[in-house]
Image: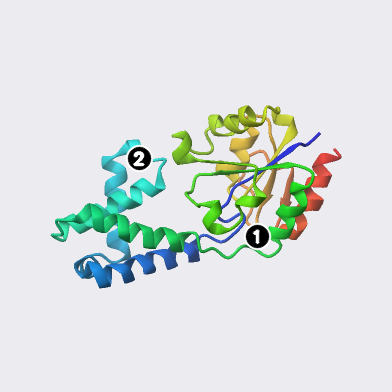
């Protein structure tokens, strides 16, 4: 019997690409007012280069997107000659992070989560750094784990095991829903969870990988997919 449903967040409950694009723009707008040399020095490719450099130099940060972002901003500001680079970076990151959480939920996301919460425990398992309170959906979740908290990322089985330990339920009582065939579906399968693949772009399933129990294109199909698994 299914008792717990866990969700990935980015590209499962909202599209992340436009959100990050907007957040980067908000950060650069802040820089234009408070640290204009940064924007003159770094375009999108330059910012990505800073990110790659930080990730290469600081492997201990690989699971913490917030720390990576803050560190790359500080690095760029320092190279632009700003002596107060840390204070500026913290303020610039605040502008970025506020926009990063200004997401547009997929149609039916809130109503579907609310309906499922009447019957199941609802959790979030994400490699990202979304803040559910800032997004405005923290009331719909019973628990939340991200890669920064755990020091590891999906598809590591230990990520999913943490949810099992937290709830006290076994894997056969879980359904995990996510958009990534590897990180979400294969990761959840590795500990014995049932899975639903969120596939809005109708991608082909990876050859040779065990398919998810159910596949949906829209969240208004989710309740039926959960019921199919619950009754199986």
Q: Residue furthest right?
A: 231
Q: Residues within 10 Å of mark 1 (few under 14, many from 20)?
A: some
Determine the residue positioned at 40% across, 43% down.
64
Snapshot colouring: rainbow
The quarter of the rendered structure image containing the C terminus is top right
Answer with left or right where residue 118 lies relative to residue 14.
right
> What residue lies at 59% left-to-right and 36% top-to-bottom?
187
How far across and how far down the image is residue 53, in percent?
A: 27, 48
Which percent across, then down, holds residue 153? 48, 38
At a point 58% along the width and 65% down the height, the residue shown is 104
User: In the image, is 32 to the left or to the right of 222?
Assistant: left
Q: Work out which quarter of the rendered image holds the N terminus and state it.
A: top right
Query: Which one is in front, 157 or 109?
Result: 109
Mark sitting earlier along the chain (2/1):
2
- Is residue 125 or residue 183 the one in the foreground? 125
Label 1 SS: loop
Q: Judge left or right: residue 115 versus residue 202.
A: right
Residue 200 disc label: 1
Q: Quadrant of residue 3?
A: top right
Count of numbered labels shown in the rendering: 2
Above or below, comparing residue 43 to residue 132 in the picture: below
Q: Where does the image place residue 223, in percent across and percent down from the top left?
A: 79, 52
Residue 52 position, x and y percent, is: 31, 49
Q: Label for residue 61?
A: 2
Can residue 203 be seen here? The reply is yes
Q: Is residue 218 visible?
A: no
The label shown at residue 153 is: none
On screen, 67 above or below 73? above
Tag 2, which secondary structure? helix
């Amino acid at each position: 019997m299914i008792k717990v449903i866990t969700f990935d967040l980015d590209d499962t409950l909202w599209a992340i690409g436009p959100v990050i694009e907007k957040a980067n723009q908000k950060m650069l707008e802040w820089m234009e007012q408070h640290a204009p040399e940064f924007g003159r020095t770094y375009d999108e490719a330059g910012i990505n280069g800073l990110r790659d450099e930080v990730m290469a130099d600081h492997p201990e940060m690989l699971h913490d997107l917030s720390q990576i972002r803050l560190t790359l901003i500080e690095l760029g500001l320092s190279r632009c000659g700003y002596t107060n680079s840390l204070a500026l970076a913290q303020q610039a990151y605040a502008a970025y992070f506020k926009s990063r959480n200004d997401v547009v939920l997929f149609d039916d996301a809130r109503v579907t989560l609310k309906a499922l919460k009447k019957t199941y425990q609802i959790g979030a398992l994400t490699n990202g750094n979304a803040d559910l309170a800032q997004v405005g959906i923290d009331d719909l979740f019973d628990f939340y784990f991200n890669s920064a908290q755990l020091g590891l990322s999906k598809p590591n089985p230990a990520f999913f095991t943490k949810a099992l330990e937290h709830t006290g339920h076994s894997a056969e009582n879980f359904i995990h829903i996510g958009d990534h065939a590897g990180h979400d579906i294969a990761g959840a399968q590795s500990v014995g969870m049932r899975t639903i693949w969120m596939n809005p772009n109708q991608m082909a399933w990876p050859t040779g990988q065990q398919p998810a129990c159910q596949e949906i294109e829209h969240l208004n199909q989710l309740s039926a997919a959960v019921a199919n698994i619950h009754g199986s």
